[in-house]
Image: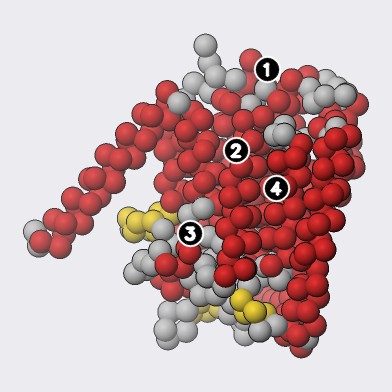
């Protein structure tokens, strides 16, 4: 055996030993798993990971360890929506086995959809919604602070964490708009950062942190969304906040609303002039971006029932594309192009179910976060950590909705969020 292979084997054994140690620690301290997982989404770049046949990113590795440690013995109330998602993933697996889908696509659904979804289900069952909300709020407070610092200094500290892999080459570059660098944080691109900030908003709102701290966090998240110079990120963040006001009033005291109003006015006053100037300067670039998203729908006729679209192609350099397009900023269309129209329709059913659940109640932070993001899915693909965070939140939403349904009363009809939402009943908690 060559020295290089011996070194690779040694590294793999060390990593495996660390993974086992981490799983053992999480088994006895589930909150450690929660913190590590949310931090791996918000504070670890997508290119940090190891190549084990397939690339295993930090969030995937932590998520698998959390599932190994906590899934056995967890009492989870499975629902029909778990079954629909499981069926969709089963169709992807069958498509791969039948030669209709690429192995990379099947791997992406397993690690980018299934793992985070199950982590969300398990962490709610083990720790309750309050712990999850507080952790998301605090991690994204740090995310927002780093993004604001990045915008002020023009330096992205995560880009310095260089790795010699294709993921670093693809996502480490800083994009520009209107002559200014767009803030990307650890997310590798401004758009997934912006919509991930929006996903965090309902959890910040419901976290039960001190009113002033939540208000400051909202202001920083709002400024961070603005300095991505992503219209969809800014609109999604604002929409998420509006939905919180409408649907999550039980978590908002008069004092909190006052603090939030002050913080948002100050944040808007600081960030709006810069955003307006950037989009004015961008001019044709911004309008061209909107036209490109409209042109993407021309690929729809190439979508088949199962598997990859006939428009898929790979050039001589190994770079993939779809027809004349190099990238697809549309999660719905990208799903159809990669896995077929049948899988995309199943996910659309889940989206409609989320809207119906929002209208009928009970309304939970996870459900509000998913509904706030649904319009954005035609403008952003499941890329970098946004994919992981979205499916994690989807798992949280299903767990919270199942718990709330067990408790009975809708959240918004009570002066305080019901115990089923803050801490699930024993039927969905850890086994005795």
Query: Who comes first in sequence, dot 4 or dot 2?
Result: 2
Query: Label 1 to label 3, Cα distance in Å?
Result: 36 Å
Mark 3 secondary-structure assignment = loop
Q: Where's the N terminus, which quadrant?
A: bottom left
Query: Label 1 to label 2, Cα distance in Å?
Result: 20 Å
Left or right: where 315 falls relative to 407? left
Query: Who comes first in sequence, dot 2 or dot 3?
Result: 3
Residues tagged 4 and 2 counted as in contact (Cβ below 8 A) = no
Which one is in front in this view, the residue at disc 1 or the one at disc 2?
A: 2
Can you say whether 128 is above or below 206 in the image? above
Residue 235 can be seen, yes or no? no
Which one is in front in this view, the residue at disc 4 or the one at disc 2?
A: 4
| Residue drawn at 51 percent across, 56 percent down | 108
Residues tagged 2 and 3 counted as in contact (Cβ below 8 A) = no
Query: Who comes first in sequence, dot 1 or dot 3?
Result: 3
Residue 21: give x, y in percent of width and height: 32, 34
Residue 111: give x, y in percent of width and height: 49, 50
Left or right: where 319 falls relative to 223? left
Name the disc covering residue 425, or none.
1
Query: Who comes first in sequence, dot 4 or dot 1?
Result: 4
Q: Which residue is mark 4?
A: 217
Q: Which residue is mark 3?
A: 45
Name the disc covering residue 135, or none.
2
| Residue drawn at 82 percent across, 24 percent down | 416
Residue 129 can be seen, yes or no? yes
Query: Label 3 to label 4, Cα distance in Å?
Result: 22 Å
Name the disc covering residue 55, or none.
none
């Amino acid at each position: 055996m060559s020295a290089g292979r011996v070194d690779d084997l040694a590294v793999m054994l060390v990593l495996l030993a660390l993974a086992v140690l981490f799983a053992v620690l999480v088994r006895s301290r589930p909150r450690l798993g929660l913190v590590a997982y949310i931090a791996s989404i918000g504070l670890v770049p997508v290119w940090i990971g190891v190549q084990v046949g397939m690339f295993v990113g930090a969030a995937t590795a932590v998520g698998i360890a959390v599932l190994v440690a906590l899934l056995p013995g967890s009492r989870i109330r499975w629902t029909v929506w778990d079954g629909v998602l499981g069926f969709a993933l089963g169709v992807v697996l069958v498509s791969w086995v039948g030669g209709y889908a690429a192995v990379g696509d099947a791997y992406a659904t397993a690690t980018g959809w299934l793992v985070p979804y199950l982590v969300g289900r398990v962490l709610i069952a083990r720790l309750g919604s309050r712990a999850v909300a507080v952790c998301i709020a605090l991690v994204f407070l740090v995310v927002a602070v780093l993004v604001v610092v990045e915008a002020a200094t023009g330096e992205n500290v995560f880009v310095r964490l260089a790795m010699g892999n294709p993921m670093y080459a693809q996502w480490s570059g800083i994009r520009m708009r209107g002559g200014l660098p767009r803030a990307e944080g650890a997310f590798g691109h401004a758009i997934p950062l912006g919509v991930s900030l929006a996903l965090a908003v309902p959890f910040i709102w419901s976290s039960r942190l001190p009113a002033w701290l939540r208000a400051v966090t909202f202001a920083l998240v709002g400024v961070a969304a603005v300095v991505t110079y992503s219209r969809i990120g800014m609109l999604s963040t604002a929409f998420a906040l509006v939905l919180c006001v409408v649907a999550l009033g039980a978590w908002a005291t008069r004092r909190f609303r006052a603090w939030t109003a002050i913080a948002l006015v100050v944040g808007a006053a600081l960030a709006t002039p810069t955003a307006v100037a950037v989009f004015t300067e961008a001019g044709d670039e911004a309008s061209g971006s909107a036209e490109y998203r409209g042109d993407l729908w021309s690929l729809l006729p190439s979508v088949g029932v199962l598997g990859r679209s006939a428009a898929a192609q790979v050039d001589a350099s190994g770079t993939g594309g779809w027809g004349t397009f190099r990238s697809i900023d549309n999660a719905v269309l990208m799903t159809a192009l990669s896995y077929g129209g049948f899988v995309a329709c199943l996910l659309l059913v889940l989206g409609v179910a989320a809207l119906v659940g929002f209208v009928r109640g009970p309304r939970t932070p996870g459900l509000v976060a998913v509904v706030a993001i649904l319009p954005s899915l035609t403008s952003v693909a499941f890329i970098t950590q946004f994919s992981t965070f979205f499916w994690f939140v989807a798992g949280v939403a299903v767990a919270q909705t199942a718990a709330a349904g067990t408790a009975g009363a809708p959240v918004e009809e009570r002066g305080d969020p019901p115990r089923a939402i803050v801490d699930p009943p024993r039927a969905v908690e850890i086994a005795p």
